[in-house]
Image (cartoon, rainbow, N blue to C red):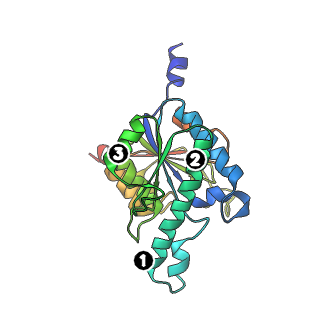
């Protein structure tokens, strides 16, 4: 009885969910698939009804990738700013889908655009979360040279999230690319330093280091399986749990 009660209790109180822009495109590969966005919104709604304070960071790769521009001769800062604006488009689409399901949502941007979203203010974001609103952080950190993974790690630290949930198109973190190596082995749990030292494709090193320095666990899981967001929140053993940091090093 005690075990079932414990299993029914959410593992986290406040989380940051990191979504790639490509996740919103679905099989189209580009742009926004309304059906995919609606499915994500319904999954987030299941989490919100549990009383979990939920923040989201979404990428912009389905519209524009800064790396595509600057590797082909475009000014790096300009290309990155274009990517930040792409994340705002995705954030508004996600907000619309969430509110269609009756979920109160706020978009906060690191680049000021008062007509469509609030400016990012840490205390206001926390207050929204405490009131049960989903907060979507858009426009990255507001600075070029930083990925949306780093944005998610930074915002998770700022709002004192219990965990960062990294939604991907694979079942977790592998020792090699499972798309190229059918013998690739998935890690159920791994430490931050191992991720960094082995160059594993979890997030960029800046984001991973930021989570390590602030002892924010990362759960990497497959967004393609409906209900996985709730399963992670409930503490089910899916995906890969990335942990460690200062406490383990001492």
Residue identifier under label 3: 124
Helix, strand or loop at mark 1: helix
Residue 172 visible in the picture = no
State the CA–CA distance, disc 1 to disc 3.
28 Å
Residue furthest to the bottom in view is 73
Helix, strand or loop at mark 3: helix
First along the sequence among labels 2 and 3: 3
Please identify, in this view, whether the residue under mark 1 or under mark 3 is nearer the observer: 3
Left or right: 20 as drawn, with respect to 32: left
Between 165 and 88, the residue placed more toward the observer is 88
Left or right: 31 as drawn, with respect to 51: right
Residue 53 numbered mark, or none: none
Between 39 and 221, the residue placed more toward the observer is 39
Residue furthest to the top in view is 1
| Residue 95 in the image: above or below residue 129 | below
Please identify, in this view, whether the residue under mark 1 or under mark 2 is nearer the observer: 1
Please identify, in this view, whether the residue under mark 2 or under mark 3 is nearer the observer: 3
First along the sequence among labels 1 and 3: 1
Q: Position of residue 74 (x, y in %)?
A: 50, 84
Residue identifier under label 1: 77
Between 138 and 202, the residue placed more toward the observer is 138
Residue shown at the point (52%, 18%) measured from the top left: 5
Residue identifier under label 2: 221
Residue furthest to the right in view is 27
Helix, strand or loop at mark 2: strand
Q: Position of residue 217 (x, y in %)?
A: 42, 44
Residue 219 visible in the picture = yes
First along the sequence among labels 1 and 2: 1
Badge 1 crowding class, 10 Å Cα cut-off, few under 14, some 14 to 19, many 20 or more, is: some
Residue shown at the point (30%, 43%) measured from the top left: 247
Q: Position of residue 127 (x, y in %)?
A: 36, 39
């Amino acid at each position: 009885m005690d075990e079932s009660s414990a299993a029914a209790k959410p593992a986290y109180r406040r989380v940051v969910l990191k979504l790639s822009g490509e996740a919103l495109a679905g099989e189209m590969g580009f742009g926004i698939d309304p059906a995919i966005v609606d499915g994500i919104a319904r999954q987030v709604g299941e989490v919100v009804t549990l009383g979990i304070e939920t923040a989201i960071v979404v990428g912009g790769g389905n519209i524009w990738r800064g790396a595509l521009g600057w590797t082909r001769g475009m000014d790096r800062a300009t290309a990155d700013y274009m990517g930040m604006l792409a994340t705002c488009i995705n954030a508004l689409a996600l907000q619309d889908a969430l509110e269609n399901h009756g979920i109160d949502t706020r978009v906060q941007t690191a680049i000021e655009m008062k007509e469509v979203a609030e400016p990012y203010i840490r205390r206001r974001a926390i207050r929204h979360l405490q009131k049960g609103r989903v907060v979507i952080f858009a426009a990255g950190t507001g600075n070029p040279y930083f990925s949306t993974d780093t944005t998610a790690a930074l915002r998770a630290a700022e709002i004192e999230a219990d965990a960062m949930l990294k939604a991907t198109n694979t079942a977790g973190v592998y020792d090699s690319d499972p798309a190229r190596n059918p013998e690739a082995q998935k890690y159920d749990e791994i430490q931050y330093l191992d991720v960094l030292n082995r160059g594993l494709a979890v997030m960029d090193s800046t984001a991973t280091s930021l989570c390590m320095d602030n002892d924010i666990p990362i759960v990497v899981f497959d967004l393609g399986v409906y209900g996985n967001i709730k399963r992670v929140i409930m503490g089910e053993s899916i995906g890969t749990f990335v942990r460690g940091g200062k406490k383990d090093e001492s």
